[in-house]
Each structure stands twice: as structure tokens, then as C-alpha cells.
Amino acid sequence: MVHRTRAETLSVPRGLVLRLPFGRPFGAPGNPEQQRVVLEDALTMLGSAREPGEIRTMPYRWRREDYGRILTERHGGTSAGI
């Protein structure tokens, strides 16, 4: 998880851009649902990125998303054991 300008400057192999505070690459401490969403997105990108240097920007906003709902929608009615 990186800032877009840093990813472009450093030519990272792949980057996931999130609007989260510096030092919180996976989300807020004590928020396992948010952390799981971010981790799932990162793993999905690792498996689906086809071009070197691919950078994706995720729409999530710090403490403004319902990550439990996102997980429920992704996993068909369960929050995947969280």
C-alpha cells in the first residue's frame, strides 16, 4: 500500500493506493473488518495484476466505510468469520 506519487517515482512492481493515514497501511488498529478488506484487496491485486508497475486506487475513506457490509457483500451474507 503506497501513495501514488511514491509508487510512480519508485517504479514499484505493483501498488495499491489507499486514502489511509501514514503508518496505517492496513487500516485502524482494532478494526479487523477494515484490515481484512484491505488485505483481501491487496491479495486480489497480486493475483490479477498483469502489467509491471500496475497501480490501483481503492475508493475507501478512513473511518467512513462500513467494512462489515463490504465483507458481507463479498462473501454472500457472512462477514467471513470476523
Image (cartoon, rainbow, N blue to C red):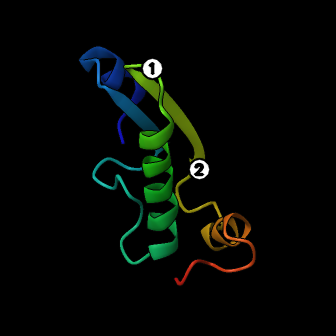
Identify residue type, mark 2.
Tyr
Residue 29 is situated, as x and y percent measured from the top left of the image, at 36, 72
- Is residue 17 positioned above or below 78 on the image? above
- Is residue 6 positioned above or below 68 on the image? above
Residue at point 57%, 78% (across, down): 80
Identify residue type, mark 1.
Glu
Residue linked to disc 2: 60
Label 2 packing within 10 angstroms: few (<14), some (14-19), many (20+):
some
Q: Quadrant of residue 2?
A: top left
Residue at point 53%, 84% (across, down): 81
- Mark 1 falls on what kind of element? loop
Residue 14 is situated, as x and y percent measured from the top left of the image, at 37, 30
Residue 59: mark: none
| 53 with respect to 57 (left or right) | left
Residue linked to disc 1: 51
Q: From the viewer's perspective, is the residue at label 2 or at label 1 nearer?
A: 1
Residue 31 is situated, as x and y percent measured from the top left of the image, at 45, 74
Name the foreground residue: 34 vs 81. Answer: 81
Residue 22 is situated, as x and y percent measured from the top left of the image, at 32, 47
Residue at point 44%, 38% (across, down): 16
